[in-house]
Amino acid sequence: MKTIYTARTKTTGGRKGHAKSIDDGPIDQNLSVPKAMGGDGGNGANPEQFFGAAYSACFGGAVELVAGQHDVEIGEDFFVEAHVSIGKTEEGELMLSVVLDTYLPKVQDKATGEKLVNEAHKICPFSHATRDNIDVTLNLLLDE
C-alpha cells in the first residue's frame, strides 16, 4: 500500500478515558461507557460512536465518488447513518455489526440507488477493513 495520509490519535484510560488527535487536534473528547455496557452513561463518546461516524463519513464519500462516475445526482442533503452494535458471539467473544442506512434524495430509481450503494461498498476503505470480519447490512432509503 502506498500511504496517502496517516491519522494519529492517542487514547488514555481505555473506554473511560480521553481521546485526542495528535497532529492537528480536532478530536479532543472524553470517553464514557454506555449504561447498557455497565458504565455510567456519561456525556463522553464511545468507540462505537467514533467508528460509526468514521465509517458513515467514509462510506458517504464513496457514494459521492461512485455517483459522480455514473453522472447521477444524489442531492446535497444525502446522508449515511451508521448503526454500530456491539455484542457477543455464541462463543462469548465481543463482536461488532454495522447497519448503513443511505439516503439519496435525488435518486428516484431503486435499482440506481442500490447500484450506487453496492459499488460504494466495494470501494470504501472501511468496507474493505470490515469485509468478512463483521456483519455489514446496507439499506437504501428513498422517498416514497
Image (cartoon, rainbow, N blue to C red):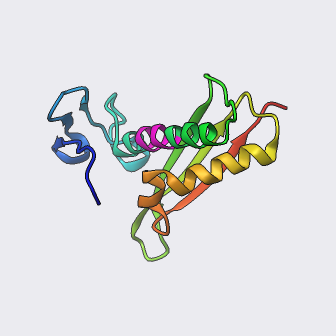
Q: In the displayed structure, would residue 11 be above or below residue 107?
A: below
Work out whether residue 17 or residue 140 is closer to the camera in this orientation and state it: 140
Q: Which residues are magenta?
A: 52-59
Instruction: Pick the quarter of the image with the N terminus.
Output: bottom left
Residue at the extreme bottom: 91
Q: Residue at x 79, y 30 (%)?
A: 143
Nearest the camera: 15 or 65? 65
Report which quarter residue 5 is drawn in.
top left
Image spot of residue 128 (x, y percent): 45, 59
Q: Is residue 83 magenta?
A: no
The image shows residue 22, relative to residue 119, as above or below, that is above
Q: Residue 61: where, in percent of width, then height?
A: 50, 38
Left or right position of 33 against 115: left
Judged by its main secondary structure, the magenta piece is: helix
Q: Residue furthest top?
A: 76
* Picture quadrant of residue 12: top left
Q: Residue at x 69, y 35 (%)?
A: 72
The residue at 72%/49% (across/down) is 114
Horizontally, residue 62 falls left or right of residue 112, namely left
- Quarter of the C terminus within the rendering: top right
Q: Nearer the viewer, residue 124 or 133?
A: 124
